[in-house]
Image (spheres, rainbow, N blue to C red):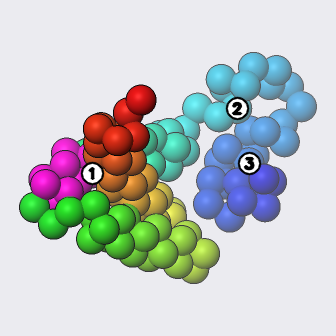
Amino acid sequence: MPDFLKKFFPVVYRRTSEPGIDSNYCKYDNQGLQLFTSSLYLAGLTATFFASYTTRRLGRKLTMLIAGNFFIVGVAFNAAAKNLAMLIIGRILLGCGVGFANQVWLALCSTPFLSS
């Protein structure tokens, strides 16, 4: 984690290495870090709305394929990230994959033969 913080969040890294700060709130209080953390969840929530339409129109199989593609592209972006923008775009794509896969799971659970 220190290498990750040093590369993408140098201000947070300096705060964590300072001996005088005891509160974790003060160490990790950074808007870029908060955006990085919440981007996955917000993208997953938003993608669920689009995935419900896609599941209705295209079916579960194609929606799952779309979710897998979002995951692969998101992982590639995160692995190749050189700056914070690439890292956040990768997290958003991973969140879209979560949203689409979640919608397929909900559609699968609501089928009559699996709900007992």
Q: Residue at x 70, y 54 (%)?
A: 5
Q: Is residue 16 left or right of residue 31?
A: right
The x and y percentages for residue 76 are: 52, 78
Tell me if mark 1 has few (under 14), some (14-19) or many (20+) residues whose alpha carbon lies within 10 angstroms of its own: many
The label shown at residue 27 is 2
The x and y percentages for residue 110 are: 30, 37
Query: In the orientation shown, which residue stands out farthest toward the top?
Result: 23
Magenta segment boundaries in residue numbering: 47-56
Query: In the orientation shown, which residue stands out farthest toward the right?
Result: 19
Q: Amino acid at mark 3?
A: Tyr
- Answer yes or no: is residue 99 visible: no
**Main secondary structure of the magenta stretch:** helix
Relative to 82, residue 19 above or below: above
Q: How many marks?
A: 3
The x and y percentages for residue 34 are: 50, 39
Q: Residue at x 10, y 61 (%)?
A: 57
Q: Earlier in the sequence, mark 2 or mark 3?
A: 3
Q: Amino acid at mark 1?
A: Ala
* Circle 1 or circle 3, nearest the eye: 1
Q: Which residue is mark 1?
A: 47
| Secondary element type, mark 2 | helix
Q: Earlier in the sequence, mark 2 or mark 1?
A: 2
CB of mark 2 within 8 Å of CB of mark 1? no
Which residue occupies the foreground of this view, 4 or 12?
4
Q: Is residue 95 left or right of residue 52?
A: right
The label shown at residue 13 is 3
Distance (Cα) linking label 1 and label 3: 32 Å
| Secondary element type, mark 1 | helix
Distance (Cα) linking label 2 and label 1: 32 Å
The x and y percentages for residue 79 are: 60, 75
